[in-house]
Amino acid sequence: MPLYEFRCAAGHVEERIAPPRTTTAACSCGEQGTRLNVFRISRAVIPGRRINLAEALEADAEVKHAYARAGVEPPDIAGVARRAVSGMQEGQ
Ligand SMILES: [Zn+2]
């Protein structure tokens, strides 16, 4: 499950591991926290595609966020995927 940041009415920002699409979580102060939209990602789902693009982008954003927090350059996941798909198409 992904790690999200939530901010409550008192301004506390806390991390919670929560199911995808979770929008609120209880803060340790007792207030309800709202999930922070750290990443601007598309919610569009392309009909007919077997991969949920929004979930793939969200996962990519989660990885980049985790790497950024660790101070490490994130991997180019989308680039790796494009090269893999390109290689599969060339192999047909
Ligand atoms: Zn709080």
Image (cartoon, rainbow, N blue to C red):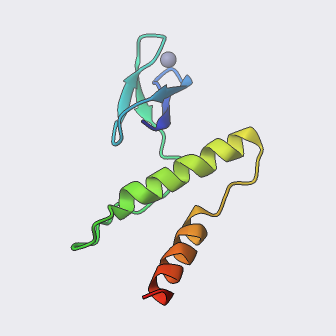
Q: Identify the residue at the far left of this view.
A: 48
State how many labels appear. Answer: 0
Quadrant assignment, res 24: top left
Q: Position of residue 29 (x, y in %)?
A: 48, 10
1 to 49, vertically: above or below: above
Q: Nearer the viewer, residue 83 or 10?
A: 83
Taking 37 as reference, is 68 left or right?
A: right
The answer to whether residue 39 of the structure is visible from this angle is no
Taking 83 as reference, is 25 left or right?
A: left
Residue at x 48%, y 77% (from the top left corner): 85
Q: Nearer the viewer, residue 10 or 68?
A: 68
Residue at x 61%, y 46% (from the top left corner): 65
Residue at x 52%, y 55% (from the top left corner): 60
Q: Position of residue 1 (x, y in %)?
A: 42, 36
User: Quadrant location of the C terminus?
Assistant: bottom left
Residue at x 35%, y 60% (from the top left corner): 43
Taking 21 as reference, is 38 left or right?
A: right
Q: Nearer the viewer, residue 55 or 7?
A: 55
The answer to whether residue 92 of the structure is visible from this angle is yes
Q: Identify the residue at the far front of this view.
A: 91
Q: Position of residue 58 (x, y in %)?
A: 45, 53
Q: Position of residue 66 (x, y in %)?
A: 63, 42
Q: Identify the residue at the far top of this view.
A: 29
Q: Nearer the viewer, residue 90 or 16?
A: 90
8 to 89, vertically: above or below: above
36 to 61, vertically: above or below: above
